[in-house]
Amino acid sequence: MISSSVEQLIEKIRSKELSSDEVIEDFVRISDELDPKFKAYISKCKVGGNGGLLNGIPFAIKDNMELVGTKTTCASKILENYTSPYTATAVKKLIDLGGTVIAKTNMDEFAMGASTEYSAFFSTKNPWDVQRVPGGSSGGSAAAVSSGMVPFALGSDTGGSIRQPASFCGIVGYKPTYGLVSRYGLVAFASSLDQIGPLTRNVRDAALIGNFLIGKDPKDATTVDHRIDLLDGIEEPVGGFKIAVPVEFVEGLSDKVRVLFDQTLEKLKKIGIKIDEVSIPSIRYAVSVYYIIAPAEASSNLSRYDGIRYGLSTTEGSIDEIYMKTKGEGFGREVKRRIMIGTFTLSATYYDAYFDKAQRVRSKLEDEFSKIFESYDAIIGPTTPAIAFKFGQLSSPLEYYLQDVYTIPANLAGLPAISVPMGFVDKMPMGLQIMSKRFDDGKMLRIARNFEKVRGDFPSPEVSR
Amino acid sequence: MRSVVGLEIHSQLLTQTKAFCSCKNDSNSAPNTNICPVCTGQPGALPVLNEKVVEFAIRAAIALKCEVHEVSSFDRKNYFYPDLPKGYQITQYFHPIATNGYLDLENGKRVRIRRIHIEEDAGKMVHSSENITESKESLIDFNRCGIPLIEIVTEPDMERSDEAREFMEKLRDILRAIDVCSGNMEEGALRCDANVSVVDDDGRSSSRVEVKNINSFKYVQYAIDYEIERISSVLRSGKDVKHETRGWDFTTKTTVSMRSKEEENDYRYFPEPDLPVLVLSKDEIKTIMENLPELPDEKAKRYENVHMISHDNAVVLSKDKKLSSYFENAVSKGIDPRDASNWIVNDLLSLFNADSEEFDPEKIPLDHLKLLIDYTNSSKISRLSAREVLAGMYKSGKDPKTLIEEMNLLQISNEDALVPVAKAVIDENPSVVEQYRNGKSSVIGFFVGNVMKKTKGKADPKIVGDLVKRLLDGEHK
């Protein structure tokens, strides 16, 4: 059970080998046993629908997704006691298909971070090594899937927050093309970059859950009506495909990572893929651009936590005092840092020099990607520069921000991207990132699935209960 | 010294639902009943643009002769205030939906319109005391939050307060004619901020002062007059005028400093990532243009040219849709347009105005008006009596025939009945008769007037004049 894929569970329930209640109860029990060790969950719940394809399938959602009647904390003190008045579209779609949410997972506060160390409550442990972070910000979702507490989970990805923890925890993490999945009910971090996606045990499950999530939502004006079946043709071979490896993604890799990546390239060549090294020069600026645009949008998105209508509130004093006390006590250090950066870069004096310039570099990056996709089916590289780091290991913000160096470009350009486990470095898993043209999610998943087949089964961590 | 005035107007749009959610657009319901996760800024909620808002904005833009842009976009204006739940207002800062229009005043002056953009209203604060600083607590009603607005910004093309007032009244008439806004300033459906500066005789301009919270058409004029005078006197005293925002206080009829420009917010405008760029097709714009109702100025011109009524009457009748359709129905009922326009503008409207009521066509059915005009034109009652009858119709709703009978106002057009009255008046005034005999024929009017008085206005003055003259001349038998 603990290592079953969603597809296998659906089949076992359909063939009556297991009852839907049994499946849910088993995962609830496994969660109860394992969560004290890995601390993946902020809260537990049991909100499900019935009578669909996901009947009897439990899952977890990141605690920045609204689910009516449950606490949605974003791992922040400011929302510690906030109860969702409505349900996010993506979550509702899965519940309407019969799925059952059994937990809301830990994360970096407001999704700002790459380790869950910035959760206001506690850190989640990496199931492969509890001395190490699970990655983030969807670290709780990644640890829960990796350890077998749930067969899949939802995360959100603004600069790598699905793919990086998936890479660190040895599972699949899929960020769909921007606009395919509704953000309605996803607590906004950086609206032009945020996207919900699944964390799963394998590529087929990512496509399966992806299929359920995508679609135009009348409540999210940035969604598009683009109907695709991600499972259609996923098993087809990929011989003759052309894949680009940007030098910007491989220069400076450690020898051990380089070896693993080269082995991966060999496997891809074996299944008939042609691989070229290319250059996408603007990738070098992606982290800088991201750390201007994301904090700018965040500084505006987080304005609403003012202690007036909901959430933490200090009611004493003048209105300015209420604002300052509420935000001062409610937001953590990293969130405050980003609000201040964003407020600075949006100010009238610096707008042109920072925000506007960053937007222009972002467009240039999009153009460079488009050029590459005229000749290539996908772009690949390691998902992260290194394996999961140890708690407290990265103390400088700059070093910490560089965790996202390979994942950020897909968000800036709105591209689909997926992390698939490629192997181990120092006994810790590492992911291969595959990116495609906008709306070419199907082709990307097909390449990922073919890689998964040539790679062979990927182990789960040994979790002692 | 010469003053320079520009206006920034906010107009609530009469759409069924709010700008970015499907809540009812009605701020008068019980507090916090027309609200949802979107308009109260719940975490994770997203705005979706109401297409009707776009249509209404385009209607206003076309009516104000603006260039409507096929591509425009939304931005966030960030500031903190308890009635602003998201901590930002969605507006169009960088690329507004329309620019470069104008509105002509009666004196021929053209006031240019710089831009029109779409934005959303904030909630409403209710303070426990009269003003915010004395209040122990304040409550917030979010019904108004997210109600669609257009902001209309003029160039500083006006020089006097009466021009600004006329601009606002004409704007209201236009917005009403195209069903875009109720135009009610007192209720805040139409709001006006004025930018005022004064240029001295050497051409040096004072700093610009923005006056906010002007909540009636009358106060547009008062507030600007007050501000022009205040700035002028500061200039005369040789001091510098502060670049600031002031608020109109209607209780004291003065403006009060709210904040200096240095204290202004930095709104940190940036493109709204939750809303895609607004793209309109030429066809959409054309369809809206073709379906736009006739505007007040065009209507007035038509009345003058087609119905040959006076310019002044035409302007009054074309201002208001109820009035103009009442007039047009009167004409199609066969009432002479000039009669109809005179009766409506001079008599009927003054009755409503005296009660400070808005014109209501139901009050005087057109059949009744037509009957009254027929009575008057056929001299069955005098013009003077007709006014009384109309007043009676306005008050009681009765038809003119009944009222004329009740009030006993039928004109005495039978000469025989008037002879004794006329004779009596002549007998009572021998000295005036003497004047007449001495060649002062104008005293005829004196006798006519007295006969009219004695008959309580029921006599036909033409018949009386004729009769008196013949009696005095000894021609009457």
Image (cartoon, rainbow, N blue to C red):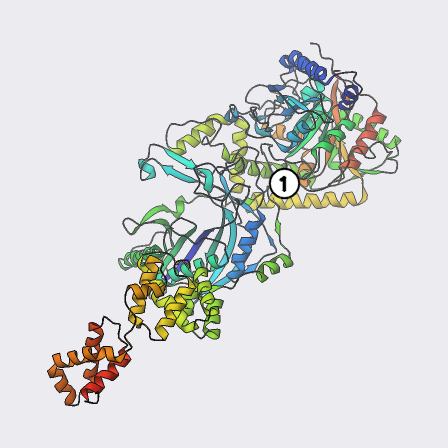
Could you tell me the amino acid type at mark 1? Pro
The quadrant in which the C terminus of chain B is found is: bottom left
- For residue B43, what is the image quadrant? top right
Q: Which residue is mark 1?
A: A218
Residue appearing at x 80%, y 26% in the figure: A259
Vertical position of residue A153 compared to residue B367: above or below: above
User: Picture coordinates of residue A408 (x, y %)?
Assistant: 67, 35
Question: In the displayed image of the protein, which residue is found farthest to the left?
Answer: B431
> Looking at the image, which is closer to me, A366 or A53?
A53
User: Picture coordinates of residue B134 (x, y %)?
Assistant: 31, 36
Within-10-Å neighbours for mark 1: few <14, some 14–19, many 20+: few
Q: Chain of mark 1?
A: A
- For residue B158, what is the image quadrant? bottom left
User: Picture coordinates of residue A346 (x, y %)?
Assistant: 53, 42
Is any atom of residue B155 visible in this view? no
Q: Is residue A323 left or right of residue B162?
A: right
User: Picture coordinates of residue A67 (x, y %)?
Assistant: 59, 27
Vertical position of residue B102 compared to residue A145: above or below: below
| Count of numbered tags | 1
Q: Is residue A79 left or right of residue A37?
A: left
> Looking at the image, which is closer to me, A451 or B126?
B126
SS under mark 1: loop
The quadrant in which the N terminus of chain B is found is: bottom left
Vertical position of residue A456 compared to residue B84: above or below: above
Q: Is residue B127 left or right of residue A366?
A: left
